[in-house]
Image: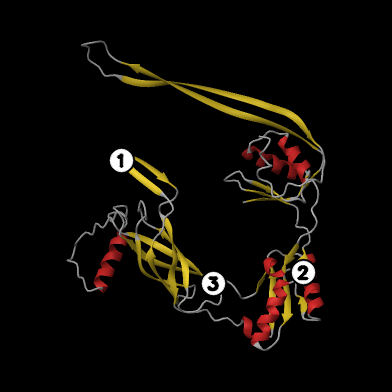
């Protein structure tokens, strides 16, 4: 358990590293320049018997019937479609900023029925809509699934996820999203995380290069005066985004993933002197089968029962002193003294935070 935190920490130096210059383009975004989510409903065909069970997913049968009707194939009334090679899917994609008709984008295909696998399937032409209901792209192509599975004699084995896949460049953009960013007299930069110190440094860096061009709006936003001519505007923003600043140290923070037990600590985290008592509670259940059968030639049935023995053991509980420190290595060393599992360490960190010993923001995701 000595490597518990060492394997998960973000930085591992025993000293505070000098500030590293960061480009403005790496820590900011341009207001109004963003991706737009798209989605659509479609059918994946050509599956090897791993598609939806139509008796349980009636919408798949209805979709097949509707598709055939549009193609001039009229099915007899009351027919029950059992197409195990077809699966209903939702198709999602992100439309990049400034995308133009004819460009290709990647798509994700996810089963919404009870299909066992989409491996080897082909997505039929699927319109992709935006939040406004308009069609912005059309998707089609062979689905790539990064997994494998097999069944035999009632047993099955599956590696990775088989009910979702990707189609690289599987959609063609049909409509662009209008953007007024480059037609305005000003452009706003937004920090990924609000910070007054970084905003001040960004404004100073821009104004040192272009006198009076930038002003701070708040702790996240900088407004920049840009040239009117388009070519000059592009060159101006290219220069601005390439400028570098020395970022202000981030807020001390501990990130805990309660589902996986992963823990990340940045170098600003500190511990005040404290004492922690940690113990482990283990429960062991042993089951012994007991078979009772009748005598030869006697009437009766063989009965199988079990004898269950439950043992509860509590270990640990020793009070451990953790010295106060501002060094990340010392913080890691102090927490490793506890010899706790990741799940137990989450509770310990919460207790240290409540006690005022952990000098950092604790975020559980």
Residue 110: name its quadrant.
Answer: bottom left
Badge 2 vs badge 3, beta-carbon distance below 8 Å: no
Q: Position of residue 332 (x, y in %)?
A: 73, 41
Q: Secondary structure at mark 3?
A: loop
**Quadrant of the rendered structure where residue 14 is?**
top right
Local packing at callout 2 (Cα closer than 10 Å; few below 14, some 14-19, many 20+) is many
Q: Callout 3 environment at 10 Å: few (<14), some (14 to 19), or many (20+)?
A: some
Observer-nearest of 334 and 272 = 334
- Image location (x, y in percent) of residue 271: 79, 44
Q: Residue at x 82, y 41 (%)?
A: 324
Q: Quadrant of the N terminus?
A: top right
Q: Is residue 44 depicted above or below 345 in this figure?
A: below
Please tell me which of labels 1 and 3 falls first in the chain. 3
Find out whether the residues at labels 1 and 3 contact each other: C-beta distance under 8 Å: no
Residue 43, given in percent of the width and then of the height, sits at 34, 64
Residue 328: % across, % down: 77, 46
Q: Earlier in the sequence, mark 2 or mark 1?
A: 1
Work out whether residue 157 can be spotted. Answer: yes
Q: Residue at x 63, y 83 (%)?
A: 182
Mark 1 residue element: strand
Q: Which residue is disc 3 drawn over?
A: 96
Q: Is residue 49 left or right of residue 359?
A: left
Q: Which circle marks residue 188 in the picture?
A: none
Tell me if I can see residue 184 in this picture: no
Report which residue position mark 1 lands on.
Answer: 152
Separation (CA) of disc 2 from disc 3:
27 Å
Q: Secondary structure at mark 2?
A: helix
- The residue beneath circle 2 is 199
Q: Residues within 10 Å of mark 1 (few under 14, many from 20)?
A: few
Q: Which residue is depicted at the point 81% across and 46% down?
A: 326
Q: Please tell me which residue lies in front, 339 or 279.
A: 339
- In space, the residues marked 2 and 1 are separated at their CA atoms by 62 Å
């Amino acid at each position: 358990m000595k490597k518990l935190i060492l394997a998960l920490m973000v930085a591992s130096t025993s000293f505070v590293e000098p500030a590293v210059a960061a480009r403005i383009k790496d820590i900011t975004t341009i207001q109004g320049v963003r991706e737009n989510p798209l989605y659509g409903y479609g059918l994946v065909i050509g599956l090897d018997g791993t598609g939806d069970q139509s008796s349980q997913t009636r919408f798949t049968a209805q979709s097949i019937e509707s598709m055939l009707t549009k193609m001039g194939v009229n099915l007899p009334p009351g027919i029950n479609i059992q197409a195990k090679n077809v699966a209903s899917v939702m198709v999602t994609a992100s439309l990049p900023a400034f995308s133009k008709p004819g460009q290709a984008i990647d798509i994700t295909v996810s089963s919404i029925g009870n299909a066992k696998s989409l491996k080897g399937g082909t997505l039929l032409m699927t319109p992709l809509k935006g939040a406004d209901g308009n069609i912005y792209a059309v998707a089609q192509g062979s689905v790539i699934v990064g997994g494998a599975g097999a069944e035999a004699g009632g047993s099955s084995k599956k590696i990775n996820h088989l009910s979702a896949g990707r189609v690289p460049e599987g959609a063609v953009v049909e409509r662009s999203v209008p953007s007024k960013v480059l037609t305005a007299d000003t452009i706003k930069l937004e920090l990924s995380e609000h910070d007054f110190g970084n905003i001040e440094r960004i404004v100073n860096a821009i104004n040192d290069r272009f006198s009076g061009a930038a002003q701070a709006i708040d702790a996240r936003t900088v407004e920049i005066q840009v040239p009117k001519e388009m070519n000059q505007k592009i060159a101006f923003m290219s220069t601005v985004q390439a400028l570098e600043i020395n970022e202000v140290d981030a807020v001390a923070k501990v990130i805990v993933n309660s589902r996986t037990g992963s823990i990340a600590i940045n170098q600003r985290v500190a511990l005040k002197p404290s004492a922690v008592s940690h113990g482990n509670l283990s429960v062991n259940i042993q089951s012994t089968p007991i078979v009772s059968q009748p005598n030869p030639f006697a009437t009766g049935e063989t009965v199988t029962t079990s004898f269950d023995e439950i043992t509860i053991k509590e270990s640990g509980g020793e009070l451990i002193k953790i010295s106060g420190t501002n060094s990340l290595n010392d913080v890691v060393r102090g927490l490793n003294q506890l010899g706790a599992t990741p799940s137990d360490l989450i509770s310990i960190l919460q207790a240290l935070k409540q006690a005022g010993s952990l000098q950092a923001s604790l975020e559980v995701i």
